Image (cartoon, rainbow, N blue to C red):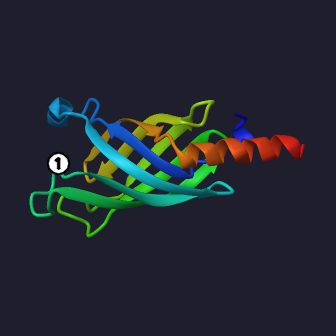
Amino acid sequence: MTARGTTLHGDWTGVYDYGDNGDDASADPVPFTASLFDIAGAVWGTTREPNTFAPDAGDELHASVNGTRSGREVRFRKTYRGRPKGGEVPIDYAGHVMRDGNRIEGRWQLAIPGRMIAGSFVMNRKPGVAAVATRVETAEDEISV
């Protein structure tokens, strides 16, 4: 797949960790799912993850993501819906889409007063219709060249 034909449209599973953040470093990695849309490099969608930090927000946390993709580089901002206690500040993600378009690896960071929290993340495209749509779009791009 060429970078030009890469699209992030589809369903993804992933995990993020807390990296080297003092007390947070001992926390287990957090799994999540994402549903993304990608039109001409504009990326948006939603995420869902187990609630690991906001005791009054229920079992799951939901967030919106908005960002951009340029070739195989992607940047987006995650904002928790309802801004639960501890999740009021948006989180910035920057990653690299692997050559086959089915995996993203990168880093996230969150700036709170007096402290920067950061870690890594990885996302894998769920197999199925979205992956097939990506291959079809790529084939169409190559034919039109």
Residue 139 appears in the figure: yes
Quarter of the figure with residue 96? top right
| Quadrant where the N terminus is found in the figure | top right
Task: Give residue 7's position: percent from left, percent from top.
Answer: 63, 47
Quarter of the figure with residue 65? bottom left
Dot 1 lies on which element?
Answer: loop
| Quadrant where the C terminus is found in the figure | top right
Task: Give residue 50's position: percent from left, percent from top.
Answer: 21, 50
Residue wearing tag 1: 52
Q: Residue at x 37, y 44 (%)?
A: 109
| 113 with respect to 145 (left or right) | left
Instruction: Compare residues 127 and 19 and report the one nearer the observer.
Output: 127
Q: Residue at x 58, y 43 (%)?
A: 131
Residue 6 appears in the figure: no
Q: Residue at x 17, y 48 (%)?
A: 52
Q: Number of labelled discs? A: 1
- For residue 110, above or below residue 127: below
Residue farthest toward the right in the current orientation of the protein: 145
Instruction: Compare residues 134 and 122 and report the one nearer the observer.
Output: 134
For badge 1, the amino acid type reads Thr
Residue farthest toward the bottom in the current orientation of the protein: 82
- For residue 86, above or below residue 81: above
Q: Residue at x 39, y 42 (%)?
A: 13
Task: Give residue 124's position: percent from left, percent from top.
Answer: 45, 37
| 136 with respect to 72 (left or right) | right
| 80 with respect to 22 (left or right) | right
Determine crowd level at label 1: few under 14, some 14-19, many 20+ residues with C-alpha closer than 10 A.
some
